Image: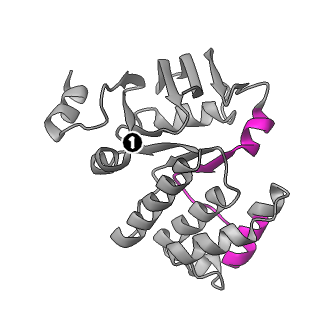
């Protein structure tokens, strides 16, 4: 099984604020990879560096065999990214946001978007400003999934989602991965990693530790932060 993501010695320094230090990891094709750590540990910085949204100081990143800097545009065509915060124009209807996200990619995603909206109980007729935090999250999930990318990257995706919708979300991830996709799940919710992920790593103060198994209990989890 080949690597979809290869990160070698990634370092990003924000000066006085913590960045990431000498991060190295590989994610294999077909994996559901748990990226664990508290807020501020460096998970989002690593992800944004992977996608070419941040200029990092040193190291190298390859996504789907492409260089994260030189091939930034080509990589984004093959990735479904959901940031931790879902920001949309408040006056737009949900259906317009979803269609706009598809049009940017120059793809007809109507059938897939309809399936996703049905599974996640998305009301496409409401305006974004009328939505709760959790419902905005659902719209963001649809926008990230509807073009059926080769790689999904979700940054804290389940905040605000009720338990049933969370289950539907992970069911969808499993289905896409079984069809050949790969998923990175960045989260601080340990139970999600234990239940759904096949591999995992922990970020702590900008440094990364690969885990031998994604199954980790609370006591072992806390150990990584107390060392």
Q: Which of 144/97 is in front?
A: 144
Q: Is 91 covered by the magenta stretch?
A: yes
Determine the residue located farthest toward the right in the rendered image. 106
Towards the viewer: 60 or 109: 109
Name the residue at 48% across, 22% down. Answer: 25
* Colour scheme in use: one colour
Instruction: Tell me where residue 111 appears, x and y as whole percent.
Output: 71, 71
Pick the front one: 165 or 15: 165
- In which quadrant of the rendered image does the C terminus lie? top left
Q: Quadrant of the N terminus?
A: top right
Q: Judge left or right: residue 55 versus residue 200.
A: right
Residue lying at 57% horizontally and 61% vertically, measured from the top left: 141
Would you place residue 202 above or below residue 59 in this image?
A: below
Residue 192 appears in view: yes
Residue 90 visible? The answer is no
The spot of residue 59 in percent (x, y) is 60, 14
Residue 75 is one of the magenta-drawn residues: yes
Residue at the limit of the structure toward the bottom, as seen here = 125
Vertical relation: 42 (above or below) 158: above
Q: How many marks?
A: 1
Q: Indicate left or right for 94 with 99 as reference.
A: left
**Disc 1: which residue:** 39
Q: Counting other residues with Cα less than 10 Å from the Cα at mark 1, is it few (<14), some (14-19), or many (20 or more)?
A: some
Determine whether, in the image, residue 171 is placed left or right of residue 182: left
Could you say which is closer to the camera, residue 73 or residue 126?
A: 73
Residue shown at 30%/31% (left/top)?
A: 213
Q: Position of residue 23 (x, y in %)?
A: 48, 19
Q: Quadrant of residue 66?
A: top right
Numbered range of the magenta stretch:
72-100
The residue sitting at 71% across, 43% down in the picture is 78
SS class of the residue under badge 1? loop
């Amino acid at each position: 099984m080949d690597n979809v993501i290869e990160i070698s010695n990634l370092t990003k320094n924000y000066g006085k604020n913590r960045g990431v230090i000498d991060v190295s990891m590989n994610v294999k094709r077909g994996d559901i990879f748990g990226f664990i750590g508290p807020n501020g540990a460096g998970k989002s910085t690593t992800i944004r560096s992977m996608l070419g949204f941040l200029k990092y100081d040193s190291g190298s990143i390859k996504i789907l065999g492409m260089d994260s800097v030189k091939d930034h545009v080509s990589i984004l065509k093959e990735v479904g990214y959901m940031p931790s915060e879902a920001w949309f124009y408040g006056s737009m209807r949900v259906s317009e946001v979803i269609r706009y996200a598809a049009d940017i990619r120059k793809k007809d995603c109507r059938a897939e978007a309809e399936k996703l909206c049905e599974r996640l109980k998305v009301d496409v007729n409401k305006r974004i400003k009328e939505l709760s935090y959790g419902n905005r999250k659902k719209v963001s999930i649809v926008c990230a999934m509807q073009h059926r990318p080769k790689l999904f990257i979700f940054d804290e995706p389940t905040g605000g989602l009720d338990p049933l919708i969370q289950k539907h979300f992970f069911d969808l991830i499993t289905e896409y991965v079984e069809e050949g996709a790969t998923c990175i799940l960045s989260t601080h919710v340990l139970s999600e990693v234990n239940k759904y992920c096949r591999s995992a790593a922990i970020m702590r103060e900008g440094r990364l530790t690969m885990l031998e198994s994604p199954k980790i209990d609370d006591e072992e989890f806390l150990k990584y932060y107390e060392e």
